[in-house]
Structure formats: C-alpha cells, structure tokens
Amino acid sequence: MSAFRAAIAFAVLSLSVSDIHFPKDMRTDVQFPPIVKRSDSGLPDGHLRPLGYQKKPEGRVKEYQELLAPREFWEQHVQHRVPLVYRQAVVKAPAFLKWQTDEYIREKYGDLDVLIEKKVESRGAQPQRMSLNDFLDSYEYEDWYVVSLLPDPMREEMMVPRSLLCGTFRQHILESNLWISAGGTSSVLHYDADHNLHCLLSGRKDFIMIHPKYADQLDLVEKKKFSGSGYSTMNMDMINVFTNPHISKIPWTWATLRPGDCVFIPSGYFHQVRSYGRSVAGTIMWSPLPEFDDSDCASTDIDQYTPLSQVNMMWTYKKGDKVRNSWQYLTCVYLSKVPKF
C-alpha cells in the first residue's frame, strides 16, 4: 500500500502547474453592496476585507429607465460629473443578442487579435496579444480577461446610445473598448482621464464609486506622467484599515449592472469594478471638454438606431493596436491631476 501511495504522490508532483486547470466559479448571485457588520474582535470594521466592508454606502447611483437627450445629459450629469445608470440602454444592439454565446463570437470574429490582462489587475503589467479564438479556448480556466480596443468589424453590432448622438459628445468620441471575462474579476480603484459609458451585454458587474474630492486619502499613483489617470495602491480584496484608517470614513455609492444596462463614469471619478459570470461589455470614451455645443442636435435624429461603425473616433483598431485616424483632428483635454469639482 505504501508503494502505491508513493507512486500516486510522484505522479501528482510530476504535473506542472500549467497542466492543472480548474473551472472558474460562474455564479452571479453575489451579495452587493456588502453587509457591514460591527466587529466583535476588537479590530476595525472591515479590516482585511474587500473594499466596501469598512463603511455602508450612501446609496445607489442615480438610475434612469429612459435615456436622456444630449443637452439633458450634459446639464444634469456630464457638466457636474455626476454618475448615472441607464437601465436596458443597449438592448436594441445586435451584440446584445448575438454576443451571448462564444460560438457566435468565434465564428464571426475569432481570427481578430485582442489584448488580454491578468484577472487580478496590475496597472504596471503589460497586456498580451492573442486571437479571440485562442482566448475563448481557455478563458474559463486561465487567469486572464480581454481589455482591448473594440475591433472595427465588431463596431457594426454595437450601438451608440441617444445621449451621445449629437453635439460635442459625438464630435469628440475617442475610442470604444471590449471587455470579456469569466468568473470573478476585481479591478483596482482608479480614475480615468476621459468620460466613459460602460455598457454590459452579458453577466453582471458591480461598481463602487467615490467622489474625486477624496483623492488625497486614497493612496494614489499616476498611471503615466501627465496621463490624467491613476489608481490606488491599496489591495482591494484585503483593505488594511490600520494603514488606511481614512477608508472607514469615505462616502461611496454603488451600482449593479445587468445585461443591457450602462453606467456613466465621469472623468476623474474613482471606481472599482467587480465582474461575475461570463461577462461581456463595451465602452465608449469621449473627451471631458468644458463646454457643450449642441448646434447640430436640431438636425440630428437621436432616436434613430446608430451603430458604432457610423461614428468617427480618434482611435481605431488595427490588428489589436490603437491607431490614430490621421484625417481626424480632435482637441482633447487631458488633465495631469484629478479634475477639481
């Protein structure tokens, strides 16, 4: 018997880590926002727990069942950098139905290159290039996800919500991005230089949102010098309340996206994102300009279905790389610091 056990042990130890794959937990029924309980251990509430366990949220991000017109969107949210959630905003997009299966994406777009990153986000890591076919072969087991410029051929099946279909918004769209993951993923707490409309097509995503006025309490590092974007060095899955005592006092709001929903994340606004299940999302990013010109809105039918392929962007896709449209000139405002509110 001892010889048999030794043989089994040798066989197990002979396997390399790369040969052992376990399917990811694809559940989407996660409690959020988390239930904050008083600690009876003498330790601070939420110590060594994920972000959100240290303090109850102030409430939900404001939600809309109908999409605002561009002028309303500007005056009520974009101008003052106030987040919002649009429910069922992109259900008319072909992508909402067709991208629900890997088989369709494989058949139509499998040979396209995308960029992938590790599941536990590291802002210093370099993304890797991979075809969608290769990614889909093993993303339910491997520790990676797609975060890439949306390939131009896929833009035909993604729509532009009416809030962005005229005026300064449409004229200053920078890029659109594709996100695909399986199982739970967790981003760092970060802010971006540009406005972002993040639309979920499959799975579930939870967002923690923090106002930029708390920037000096979030242990920030600038992503790149003068980029206008940055992130917190805190471990989002294990917040050390002793080294970050301020985190227990910082107010935050939250949002949960289901398929078809979109969230507006203003330039400079801190957010942490958690994805569950088979998650597929598309984002549209545009410049945070100080004024809004809607002189063309009167002659634009914002209620007509418009695919992303019909909108000019500063950055386009070429074999996975971002390429600037040489014929298009955009005046973009990038701030080297978090925007002041």
Image: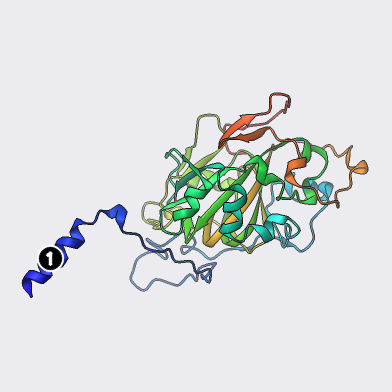
Residue for point 48% across, 47% down: 218
State the residue position of label 1: 7
Residue 120 in picture, x, y percent from top left: 42, 51
Q: Is residue 158 left or right of residue 101?
A: right
| Secondary structure beneath label 1 | helix
Location of residue 152 by image quarter: top right
| Disc 1 crowd, CA 10 A, few/some/many (<14, 14-19, 20+) | few
265 or 18, nearer to the observer:
18
Amino acid on which the number 1 mark rests in the picture = Ala
Q: Is residue 221 left or right of residue 265?
A: left
Against 54, residue 272 (above or below) is: above
Q: Is residue 55 left or right of residue 303?
A: left
Q: Residue furthest front?
A: 107
Against 179, residue 26 (above or below) is: below
Residue 257 in picture, x, y percent from top left: 63, 62
Against 23, residue 17 (above or below) is: above
Q: Looking at the image, can residue 325 be seen?
A: yes
Location of residue 206 by image quarter: bottom right
Residue for point 77% across, 64% down: 65
Q: Looking at the image, can residue 187 be seen?
A: no
Against 148, residue 83 (above or below) is: below
Q: Residue furthest left?
A: 2
For the C terminus, the quadrant is top right
For the N terminus, the quadrant is bottom left
Residue 253 in picture, x, y percent from top left: 60, 59
